[in-house]
C-alpha cells in the first residue's frame, strides 16, 4: 500500500488502482487536489482540521461517483449530497475498490470536561494500516502500521508512548503534528522513537511525499 502524507492528519492510501483520502482538513491547503483522484473520503470526526467542508462538498457536486464515510453527525454537513454519504460506526466493515476498511472506536479524546465530546472513529485499512483520528483507541485487531498523532490539545506525549505499546505495531508514522515547532518535532522523535519509549523509529513523511508499506 502506498501512503502519501499531507498536512496534519490527511493521508492518502493507494492500492491496486484504488485511492482513499482520510481526513482532508482545513489545514491541507490543496484539499481539492488531494481529493480529486480518490474513490472515497473517510472522515474520523467533525473538527475542521479533519474535514474541509467546502472542498469536499465541491468535489461531491462535481463527481456523483465520489463517496464519503464518516460518523453520522456529519450527515448535516453533506446534506446536499445525501446519496453520496454513508454514516459509519464501530464494527462496520467497508469495501472501497480493492481496499477493505474496518471501523473502530467511538469518541474523540477528552480535551476538557467543559468541551463536549464528539464522535470519533478510526479506520483500519486492509487489516494493517490504522488511522485513529483524535483518539488513542486500541482496536481489537492486529495493526502493522500505526499512524500516530503527536500533537493536539487533547494529547500528551506519554499517552502517545503508552498507545504505541498497547497497539504493538511494527511501524509508526507521525501524523497530526502541525502544532509542533521544529524543536517539538525533534523532541517527539527522541521520546517516541527507536531510542525512546516505543523502541520503534518514528517515521516522519514531509507533506506531499509517499511511503510504501
Image (cartoon, rainbow, N blue to C red):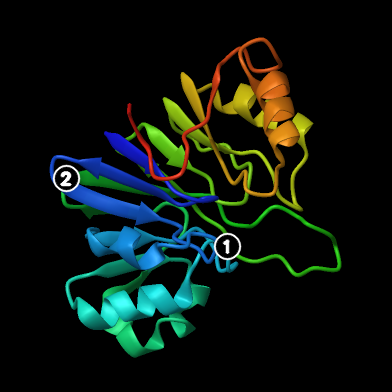
CA–CA distance in space, label 1 to label 2: 28 Å
Instruction: Please identify the residue farthest to the bottom as the structure is shown.
Output: 80
192 with respect to 96 (left or right): right
Sequence order check, earlier mark of 1 and 2: 1
On screen, residue 7 above or below 77: above
Task: Determine which of the numbered discs, if any, sits on residue 49 in the image.
Answer: 1
Element assignment for label 1: loop
In this rendering, is residue 78 above or below 25?
Answer: below
Q: Residues within 10 Å of mark 2 (few under 14, many from 20)?
A: few
Residue 101 appearing in the image:
yes
The quarter of the picture where residue 209 lies is: top left
Q: Is residue 136 left or right of residue 83?
A: right
Vertical side of 75 occupied by 200: above or below: above
Q: Residue at 46%, 18% (x, y): give it.
A: 170
Q: Which quadrant does the C terminus fall into?
A: top left
Residue receiving disc 2: 98
Quarter of the image where the N terminus is located: top left
Please name whichever residue, 133 or 30, is drawn nearer the observer in this view of the structure: 30
Q: Disc 2 on helix, strand or loop?
A: loop
Residue positioned 78% across, 39% down in the render? 156
**Side (left or right) of 118 relative to 22:** right
Which percent across, then down, holds residue 174?
55, 35
Determine the image quadrant of residue 32: bottom left
Q: Position of residue 178 (x, y in %)?
A: 63, 48
Where's residue 129, x and y in %?
39, 35
Amino acid at each position: 500500500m502506498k501512503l502519501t502524507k499531507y498536512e496534519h492528519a490527511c493521508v492518502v492510501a493507494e492500492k491496486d488502482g484504488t485511492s482513499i483520502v482520510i481526513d482532508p482538513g482545513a489545514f491541507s491547503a490543496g484539499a481539492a487536489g488531494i481529493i480529486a483522484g480518490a474513490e472515497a473520503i473517510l472522515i474520523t470526526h467533525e473538527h475542521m482540521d479533519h474535514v474541509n467542508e467546502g472542498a469536499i462538498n465541491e468535489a461531491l457536486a462535481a463527481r456523483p461517483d465520489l463517496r464519503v464515510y464518516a460518523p453520522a453527525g456529519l450527515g448535516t454537513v453533506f446534506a446536499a449530497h445525501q446519496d453520496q454519504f454513508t454514516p459509519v460506526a464501530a464494527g462496520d466493515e467497508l469495501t472501497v475498490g480493492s481496499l477493505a476498511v474496518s471501523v473502530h472506536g467511538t469518541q474523540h479524546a477528552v480535551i476538557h470536561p467543559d468541551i463536549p465530546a464528539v464522535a470519533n472513529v478510526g479506520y483500519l485499512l486492509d487489516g494493517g494500516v490504522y488511522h485513529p483520528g483524535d483518539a488513542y483507541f486500541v482496536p481489537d485487531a492486529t495493526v502493522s502500521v500505526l499512524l500516530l498523532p503527536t500533537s493536539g490539545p487533547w494529547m500528551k506525549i506519554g499517552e502517545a508512548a503508552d498507545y504505541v505499546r498497547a497497539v504493538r505495531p511494527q511501524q509508526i508514522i507521525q501524523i497530526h503534528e502541525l502544532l509542533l515547532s521544529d524543536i517539538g518535532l525533534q523532541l517527539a522523535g527522541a521520546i517516541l522513537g527507536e531510542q525512546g519509549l516505543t523502541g520503534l523509529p518514528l517515521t516522519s513523511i514531509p507533506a506531499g511525499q509517499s511511503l510504501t508499506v
